Image (spheres, helix red, strand yellow):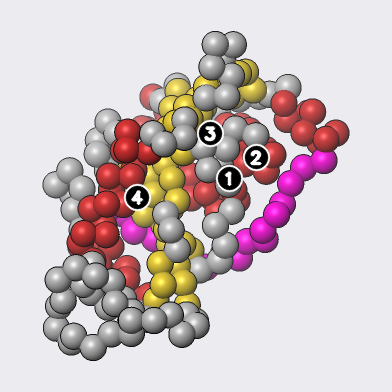
Amino acid sequence: MSIDSKATVKIGEYSRGGKTRGDTQAADHDMGCQEKQVPFGIVEEDSGQLHLTFGSSFKTSDFIVDGLEDWWQAIPREKQAVMTHVQLKVDNGPKSSGVRTQFLKRMVEFTDTTGKIIQLLYYPPYHSKYHPIERCWGILEQHWNGAQLVDTATMLAWAKSMTWKGSHPVVKLSRRLYQKGVSLSRKAMREIEARWERNPLLPRWDILIRPA
């Protein structure tokens, strides 16, 4: 799977570029946006199914892993049973990097929850064009550019109506609140570090976590 979060989406009568649809009046300056949504996406590369979660809180490690847990819980039990290995292609951003303590802690917990081997594969800097989820973000931007995302319901409707690989995405709205800057102490991190294996040839870019 390919996972990543996207730049925050401002909700309101803002000009978004592209071809105008309907009312042509839109704000061309940000006068203090009152509502924003943070997108997180998952692409199942085998099936092409796209999952989008929009959160009104902060873009954090917990937000990303909660999105993964929601995806897992939605998978039918019989499909879960035949899985042995989940490979995640990840952008090496600050909230999901291979050195982010809270992200790695949550990924160890996610591994134990699923009972599956989890492999994190990171893209090096300036290689995001190879990241499948980035292409999905590009399609979404093309799809709703020119539209005024005046409220969250309108934004969700536009997201649901886009297509990727011939199918509409599974779209969810999260109302969970997240705290920024959560990190582990060195002592707590040593316990977590014992749970993963870094590829000796690519230690920064390839991490394997086995369930307890």
Q: Quadrant of the N terminus?
A: top left
Amino acid type, callout 2:
Arg
> 71 or 200, which is in the foreground?
200
Q: Label 3 to label 2, Cα distance in Å?
A: 21 Å
Residue 32 in the image: state x and y as whole percent: 50, 83
Task: Single out the mark in the foreground, 4 or 2.
Answer: 2
- Is 1 situated above or below 59? above
Is tag 4's residue or tag 2's residue first in the polypeptide sequence?
Answer: 4
Q: Label 2 to label 1, Cα distance in Å?
A: 7 Å
Is tag 3's residue or tag 2's residue first in the polypeptide sequence?
Answer: 2
Q: Which residue is mark 2?
A: 100
Highlighted range, magenta: 168-185
Residue located at (45% from left, 21% from top): 84
Please give the label number shown on residue 51: 4
Secondary structure of residue under mark 3:
helix
Q: Which residue is mark 1?
A: 94
Q: Is residue 76 left or right of residue 167?
A: right
Task: Single out the mark in the foreground, 4 or 1.
Answer: 1
Amino acid type, callout 3:
Thr
Q: Label 4 to label 2, Cα distance in Å?
A: 24 Å
Q: Which residue is mark 3?
A: 114
Amino acid type, callout 4:
His
Please give the label number shown on residue 30: none
